[in-house]
Image (cartoon, rainbow, N blue to C red):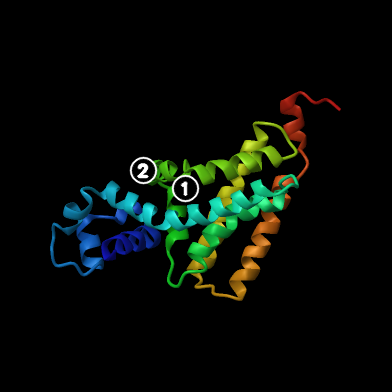
Amino acid sequence: MALIEAAERIVAERGIAALTVKDVQLAARQANRSAVRYHFGSRNDLLEAVLELRMRPVDKKRQEMLDRIGRSDDPPQARQAVEALVCPLAAETLGRADSRYARFLVQALLDPVLAEIVQKHLRAESFRMVQKLLIGLCPVGEPAAGWRANNIVKLNMITLATQEGLGTRRPESAVVVADLITSCVALLNAPASEAMDLQSGDTR
């Protein structure tokens, strides 16, 4: 656990380029120089372990929210879909003392190596379901609906990372999350731009 948390902290605060086996060993105060390789094998395996640890509760909570939406007799609403995306990650970042996980994820937006590893975990069933739901509820057609869903995912990560870095705790964090949800719903529901109309061949 100490090695995983050390790796997460290094990537979140300094980027993946700073993640070396030696630095993880020192940050975790691990005397055994072979500990990282013994327990994880490689640097990428260690990154996978960070994601596995943090994404498991996010996926569980998101799936529970999606199941409730699916059991309802009413059609899903945009706010419900956005909440299923935002709230589980917010609980695992702003809702957890000394979290660095949102900042760790944002590094994936900057580094192709980490992005590839993160993408494996974003293929989890709950994430794919909520992404599909967002695209289906978007009032504009593809490919714009896909762009918006991706932008909402990024806005979610960046906003939570920023607040996480400030050490935001409740009740302020609850206000931040509520406003993030409202902003994402507005982005999802916004009418098509003129550029989208031109691309689709709409000449109205």
Query: At label 2, which amino acid type do we have?
Result: Val
Residue 204 in percent (x, y) is at 86, 28
Residue type at the position of mark 1: Leu
Residue bearing the label numbered 1: 109
**Drawn side of residue 183 relative to residue 111, left or right:** right
Taking the spot 47% from the left edge, 48% from the top edge, the residue there is 109
Left or right of residue 8: residue 131: right
Whole-angstrom CA distance, mark 2 to mark 1, is: 10 Å
Q: Position of residue 149 (x, y in %)?
A: 62, 43
Q: Is residue 150 in sight in this rendering?
A: no
- Element type at mark 1: helix
Characterize the local packing of mark 2: few (<14), some (14-19) or many (20 or more) Cα atoms within 10 angstroms: few
Query: Which quadrant would residue 87 be assigned to in this image?
Result: bottom right
> Is residue 2 or residue 202 the one in the foreground?
2
Q: Identify the residue at image location x=65%, y=43%.
A: 134
- Residue on which the image places disc 2: 113
Categorize mark 1 by other alpha carbons within 10 Å: few (<14), some (14-19), many (20+): some
- Left or right of residue 2: residue 80: right
Q: Residue at x 77, y 31 (%)?
A: 197
Q: Are marks 2 and 1 in contact (CB under 8 Å)?
A: no
- The residue nearer to you, when weighing 61 against 109, is 61
* Residue 103 can be seen in this image: yes
Q: Residue at x 17, y 59 (%)?
A: 35
| Name of the residue lying farthest toward the right | 204
Task: Find residue 1 and name its label.
Answer: none
Determine whether 123 is above or below 203 in the image.
below
Describe the element under mark 2 as helix, strand or loop: helix
Give percent across and percent down for residue 49: 32, 53
